[in-house]
Image: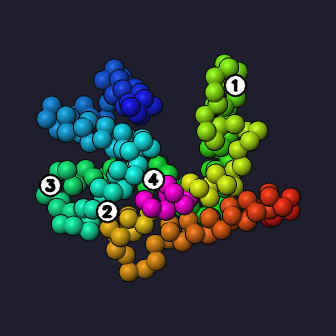
Amino acid sequence: MAVLENHHCARAFELLTTDPSCNILKSFSPERYKHARSTILSMVLATDMAGHFEFIAKFKNKIAGSGLDFSDPKDRQLVMDIAIKCGDISNAAKPTELCTKWAALIMEEFFRQGDEEKRKGIPVSMFMDRNNTVIPKCQVGFIDYIVTPLYEVWDQYMNEDKKFLALENLHKNREYWKKQQEAELTGIQVG
């Protein structure tokens, strides 16, 4: 359903159309505006995690099969959608110092949502309960099951000669979080 992503799109285009100082598309022809809007909507909706694995599979199949045809608007859109997905979940692919700062901010956002759900007497969403969510375990799972598969297929597409720094960071960050998880289980403080 992508409720949040649809809301973001609706609000962004509301601002574009009602506040002339925000309308960066005002000089576009109606046809160009329609294309830009469609492109932006597709990219924002691609960040909905409900379709995450479908996007990865589609991109992987495209690369392994006939390849991408940049004269095809659907292929160009797919690359942009995958690129924005990589940016959307990139915190785990950053250097460890940034990764941990972003993880703390994101988890605090989750916990505040969980606090609000508790206050309203509704079931607390997964990973949102500050009293029983193990952050390192959560981060290892996020890296293993969400971020790494996406970045591996992006690396295949980019086909760089050098190592992909984001994947190196993912491996380092996974090890960092795994050590934190083990320390939490044993009660030993890890720096």
* Residue that numbered label 2 is attached to: 60
Q: Give the secondary structure at mark 4.
A: helix
Q: Residue furthest bottom?
A: 161
Tell me, yes or no, whether the two marked residues, 4 and 2, touch with CB atoms within 8 Å. no
Q: Which residue is mark 3?
A: 72
In the image, which is nearer the foreground, mark 1 or mark 4?
1
Q: CA distance from mark 4 to mark 2?
A: 18 Å
Q: Is residue 160 left or right of residue 62?
A: right
User: Dot 4, how many residues are within 10 Å of its Cα: few (below 14), some (14-19), or many (20+)?
Assistant: few
Q: Are marks 1 and 2 in contact (CB under 8 Å)?
A: no
User: Would you call the spot at circle 2 few (<14 residues within 10 Å), some (14-19), or many (20 or more)?
Assistant: some
Dot 3 falls on a residue whose secondary structure is loop
Report which residue position mark 4 lands on. 87
Query: Going by the image, does 166 lie left or right of 183?
Result: left
The spot of residue 158 in percent (x, y) is: 34, 69
Q: Residue at x 24, y 62 (%)?
A: 62
Residue neighbourhood size for the residue with mark 3, other residues' Cα within 10 Å, grouped as few (<14), some (14–19), many (≥20): few
From the viewer's perspective, is residue 163 above or below residue 131?
below
The magenta segment: 143-150
Q: Given the image, on which type of amino acid does mark 1 rest?
A: Lys
Q: Main secondary structure of the magenta part?
A: helix
Q: CA distance from mark 1 to mark 2?
A: 40 Å
Q: What element does badge 2 sit on?
A: helix
Q: Judge whether residue 122 is colored magenta.
A: no
Query: Mark 2 is on which residue type?
Result: Lys
